[in-house]
Image (cartoon, rainbow, N blue to C red):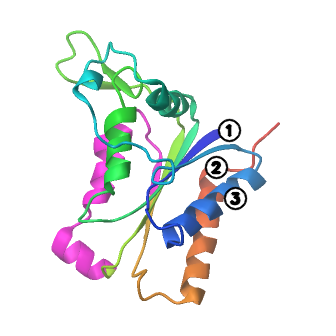
């Protein structure tokens, strides 16, 4: 399978980077083709210009790469922290710009706003990190990222099989806890994207 791994965290030494690296290693070991993007490292511009609002306008060449890979991907792995109940700006901008009409979804003529998902990804895995204890997160904030990824974005664009895992509290975690979490990353990725068949 061709699988896109998309990371958004500005700190190279972050646990988010460790998650993305573990996911990439696991996918490659299973024989998958991995397309990895570190949005901050690549300097992805998150601002959606007005010209890109027109679905008929061809995206600029730098954005076209992301759109083409998104369309081709048979699986997605998304890695980012929970910041204010949202993805970081780089990730939100990737969503705004790459999940374009005609790339990720379309509306049928006379469909009254009902979308048709265009993505061919068979599954997606979302890994998030948080510094809020899980019980407090649910009691006070709910889980806005779960709804955002599963319903507002991926289901909307045709991806029905979505697995999401949040690791917390990262800031006070021990090396042993992080190692256990990375083993969990490997297990989730392996279960979602089994060994490639030749």
Pointer 2: residues within 10 angstroms few (<14), some, or many (20+)? many
Q: Are marks 3 and 2 in contact (CB under 8 Å)?
A: no
The span shown in magenta is: 134-163
The majority secondary structure of the magenta stretch comes to: helix
Kindly check if marks 2 and 1 are in contact, taking CB atoms under 8 A apart as contact: yes
Q: Is residue 157 visible?
A: no
Tell me, for residue 193, which label it has, or none.
Answer: 2
Circle 1 residue: 1
Image location (x, y in percent) of residue 82: 33, 65
Kindly identify which residue carries mark 3. Answer: 26
Seen at 39% across and 16% down, the residue is 58
Q: Which quadrant of the rendered structure holds the N terminus?
A: top right
Q: Quadrant of the C terminus?
A: top right
Separation of disc 3 and disc 1 at Cα? 13 Å
Name the outermost residue toward the right.
Answer: 198
Q: Is residue 143 magenta?
A: yes
Asked whether, in this view, residue 46 is left or right of residue 176, the answer is left
Picture residue at 25% right of the left edge, 59% below the top: 144
């Amino acid at each position: 399978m061709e699988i896109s791994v998309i990371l958004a965290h500005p700190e190279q030494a972050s646990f988010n980077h460790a998650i993305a690296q573990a996911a990439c290693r696991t996918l490659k070991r299973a024989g998958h083709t991995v397309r990895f993007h570190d949005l901050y490292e690549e300097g992805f511009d998150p601002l959606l210009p007005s010209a890109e609002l027109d679905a008929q306008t061809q995206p600029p060449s730098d954005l076209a790469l992301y759109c083409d890979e998104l369309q081709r991907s048979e699986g997605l792995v998304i890695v980012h922290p929970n910041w204010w109940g949202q993805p970081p700006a780089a990730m939100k901008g990737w969503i705004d710009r790459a999940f374009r009409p005609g790339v990720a979804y379309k509306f049928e003529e006379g469909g009254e706003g009902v979308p048709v998902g265009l993505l061919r990804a068979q599954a997606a895995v979302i890994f998030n990190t948080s510094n809020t204890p899980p019980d407090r997160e649910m009691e006070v904030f709910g889980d806005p990222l779960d709804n955002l990824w599963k319903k507002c974005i991926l289901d909307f664009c045709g991806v029905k099989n979505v697995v999401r895992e949040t690791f917390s509290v990262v800031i006070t975690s021990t090396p042993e806890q992080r190692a256990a979490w990375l083993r969990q990353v490997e297990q989730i990725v392996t279960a979602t994207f089994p060994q490639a068949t030749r």
